């Protein structure tokens, strides 16, 4: 089985980190393909960045259509997840949705630790929509996304301080790392704190494998029905569906 | 005061209809400016269309920045609303959010009647996020959006049948029209059914006027903080914020 | 258009303050009429005061029936709002409902700062009923209502301290002032704190104007159906509806 | 122990019916005192009637203060319950709150059957506030309240039809009778349908006895703090609290 | 009337304490029968203990069937409540459900103070299921259950410290004691803190009396339908229902 | 990796069916071990059966401890899931929790179709606790569990009729089969109806594999802390934890 991991921001080092995390947990027989968006922001911090990352994300999914059995969108904001599910005829997984579902099997109460305050409420809204609003709290650790790429930034110290607050103040029984750029830290943090630490990239890869193995894909009835054939104009004209997309 | 109405799909006849509806309710001294997106789908039906309409929407908002005091996004899916609020330094209103808040002042229970099944759950999720999930039901009437532009399509009959079901089966005390393309029908339907019928375009224009009069604009603390300066690449490079956008 | 502002407590200085706030934001062509209840408590602090303020409120609405196009109840507890909506055949707005709907267009998370602890849960219950329970927190600042009429009382210091706690502890992106007596403070506090500060009186006036302009009024189907003709006895006999009231 | 049952409408035959129901279930040693409001509507149908019934209700509670150990408000809308709890220094029970709590011990899912559509949403909002929104449905049976006093009215037939719909369509495991005027019907309906049928008057009497026996009364900290001493003017001046009321 | 109190753990001193508390509040004519489980854990601390206490609980209910008019399960985790309701043809009450319903008549917001952290979320989930999630907070005071049987343990000091935090930090208007082993402390704590303090044993006894007096018992339609006749094997074979159990 | 599937009822043919379903989807390298409870009911229909199935379930988990890397409880009621998670030091999965999480990746709205009415509300309560209450509906198809073992029973016809109602009346975008005994029907029903059909056994096996691959196991902090060492008496004495169990 081939799983396509698309990084919806344009920073290739993050893509590489996600690919490494994915391969570490992939089953025998799963091939991880990694793609970096070629248009849009270098990092996704808030709603504006996120919205403008979607055309780049969909371009990667579209150009590679037919070459993958499932896709993972490698941003914890689940950027473009609903559009991607409507477009694709294979399963598409987001990091936040996968990670909180996974944490739900391990703990009754848990905390998501993300980067900036501007992403905190965005992720909190996702968590509520995914049904975990009564079980999960979201915290920001005041780390710009790209500082996670820079070992000298002090980012890890901030992240650890926030995890410690989650454990002492929230009654957190598990921690979810709320940014794709934290994917390499999960195992070490789990050892340090002695509670499950869930990384979204790894979680999403396993959910993708699960759905493919189960012969399940996105329902095309209702919310995620394939795009209707219609004209798209201007710079978006390449996205016009011919017929039902795929 | 100048209110910019942006139609995020590329069908100019819908923009014109929205502009007429807006001008009918605008206060003395309010100037309505209408813009049609120049890139993206001809109509927005579902998540894929919606996501790809956002760059066109933001382009209109951006190119006209400084010339309007508030903006209205003329699609009932509130396409790109969060990104637009992050971008703009003036208030931005969506039709769904404005219409359900307005209906909430008139009725304890109401029903939104939209077009296609694929939009029903999308709007239902918005309604829940806006806090009206316990008070409002969403129904689809099986009308493709552009049929609303065609008098011979039978669309109005389908819409009326669905309103009648809302009144008899849901205990609806008011009706919200769940598509910008229905904006011209509100007053007539209100007369026929004797309950408040809320049109999102008109409701959003009045909310925009209210916010401007009150000296209020989108908070730049937290969720809607202005985009951070960073590179955007490829076809999206024009969207890179210089500094905090506005 | 004529908007009647009824102060449901009997303190005329509060009415005057509300009328000034209303006139500051009213549109050209809107006339603000202000009335002070002539029976009931001098201030509304808790459920007992509130319930006994309703006959005075309804008396003002009733005696002036036919002379106003919409009414605003100038108490943040939305005293008698449901009864008034049932009675009147024009739109009636409450401060709390108007203010939180307005704040919802500006911020994802916000805090209402009210006066006494006894009003805090009462308002929190309103906020939840209006659908903002997941987005808004309510705080009391330990200020008796009438201290807001007394510049030497230290009330403003307490209010500011509570706003500062809302910003630092709640992640509030906007502030709602939770008492009609705070109406004159909104603009100054907005400047000081750099986040939207919403005053209920002003917000309600704009919602009233909006509904009148939109040709919308309270649904008379279901919850707010006009009172049925029936005898009322004793001190309440003057309130007996003749036929459907209005 | 003495329990005061106050009928907040002015129809003495309903008071009598409630008193009979109360005495049927009262413990040895419990004395039931019944009072009928002397001011306000003959029946409570909707928000307007309800608000104007409160002064009459509070008058009965006040004039008899010191002569009862707990009070029951004999209207299913829980008219004035919060004001009465703030006023009294003994426990006060409402029919709706008592009945749905009682039903909750008997069934996971149940249906409240009330009189008019205008009361349905009002009661539904109470049920949600009392925490039973996910477990209970509310139905109206289109019976004006006073028809329950008239055996020839056909009211019982309408009520039974609605109970049958609750059983077949809602999966109701128990029925709550949603009007004080139905109190005499509970046992017979329970026999007919073979499911628990809960009457609010009887339920509230037992909750009142329970609280008195347990030495528990309304908390005077927070929401239900005693009214603060302050002037009340006009027709309401008799309601001014001297000091903390009681 | 005879009320059976079953202690689902095997510590007879706790049973005795519960029986004393029950007799203190029982009505004239109510006989309290107390039974201690003869199989299972000495105390119930968490899900594992609780699940394994159920056969012992059901054994007591079963062997005494026909000799009691209602039953109370004397553990705040409401251990086996749903199974017991399905089994018995008389009302069965749990401490948590009874206590939070009782507190709901006294206060808008309250806090449950329980023993160990491992029980906190378990009880919080019950509180939410019983509909009090928006009104009640649950706190653990780090007291092993059996320390409550040992006066020298310091348990009361820990409990008092937690109650004080509930009052100062949660805005609690009342306190619920979240362990059957605290039943003897309620009255004293109520005097100390001046807010209602609800004990689950006493509350459940009064609810049991109420249901019996009202002629109400668990619905046998739906959730709590009597067990179907079927073979049970091995160590559980004695539990096989013959026909509908009772 | 070795995954233990425990059937908590004593019907070996159901265990066999579950094992077959599990092996069909297991990854290369996953060994499925299947165990049938040796004490308790032949089928689990309602709360009484479920509670009495837990000792048998825990016995299988306990006796085999150390021989499996994860466990699946093969009953859709998630019988004993919380106790099992507290006991085990490897991940434990339930069918309902796994299936609804899986369906959540495929559809915004879906319907669970289970067997008897007595299980419907039980499962509905699980679905709400797992956070899917706003997205999923639960239906009963009036099939006794063991009829699923009998091809001549007409069970499949009833199941199909209920699925068809879910599709036409609920707007279901996917179907979850709500009984372990339906595990063999998923693929065929998916082909017939053209929407995803999720089987809990298969879903749980994949979640178990995922957690093991990710190096994640149940948090031992808080809700699922290991049982404390303490005496268990009587028929349950074998379940006494020595130290923290495992």
Image (cartoon, coloured by chain):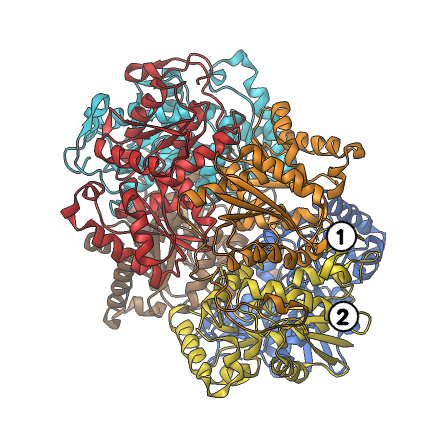
Chain colours: A orange, B yellow, C blue, D brown, E cyan, F red
Q: Which residue is mark 1?
A: B221
Q: Quadrant of the C terminus of chain B?
A: bottom right
- Does A139 sit left or right of B87 as displayed? left
- Does E85 sit left or right of D66 as displayed? left
Same-subunit check for callouts 1 and 2: yes
Q: Quadrant of residue A188?
A: top right
List x then y, in percent, for residue E158: 59, 22
List x then y, in percent, for residue B95: 61, 70
Q: Quadrant of the N terminus of chain B?
A: bottom right
Q: Which residue is mark 2?
A: B212
In-front residue for pair A199/E175: A199
User: Circle 1 — which element?
Assistant: loop
Residue B213 visible in the shown view: no
Precedes in sequence: disc 1 or disc 2:
2
Tell me: residue F230, above or below residue D98: above
Residue A55 visible in the shown view: yes
- Does F237 sit left or right of C16 as displayed? left
Q: Which chain's residue wears label 2?
A: B
Q: Which disc is residue C149 wearing? A: none
Q: CA distance from mark 1 to mark 2?
A: 19 Å
């Amino acid at each position: 089985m081939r799983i396509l991991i698309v990084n919806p921001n344009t920073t290739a080092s993050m893509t590489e980190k996600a690919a490494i995390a994915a391969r570490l947990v992939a089953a025998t027989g799963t091939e991880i393909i990694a793609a970096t968006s070629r248009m849009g922001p270098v990092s996704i911090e808030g709603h504006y960045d996120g919205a403008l990352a979607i055309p780049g994300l969909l371009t990667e999914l579209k150009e590679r259509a037919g070459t993958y059995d499932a896709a993972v969108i490698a941003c914890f904001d689940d950027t473009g997840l609903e559009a991607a599910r409507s477009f694709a005829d294979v399963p598409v997984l987001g990091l936040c949705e996968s990670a909180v579902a996974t944490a739900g099997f391990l703990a009754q109460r848990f905390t998501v630790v993300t980067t900036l305050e501007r992403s905190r409420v965005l992720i909190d809204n996702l968590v509520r929509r995914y049904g975990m609003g009564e079980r999960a709290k979201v915290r920001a650790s005041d780390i710009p996304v790209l500082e996670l790429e820079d070992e000298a930034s002090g980012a890890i110290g901030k992240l650890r301080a926030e995890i410690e607050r989650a454990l002492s103040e929230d009654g957190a029984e598990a921690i979810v790392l709320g940014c794709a750029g934290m994917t390499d830290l999960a195992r070490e943090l789990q050892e340090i704190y002695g509670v499950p630490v869930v990384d979204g990239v790894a979680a999403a890869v396993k959910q993708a494998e699960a759905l493919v193995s189960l012969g399940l894909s996105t329902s095309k009835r209702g919310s995620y029905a394939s795009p209707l054939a219609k004209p798209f104009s201007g710079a978006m004209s390449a996205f016009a569906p011919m017929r039902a997309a795929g």
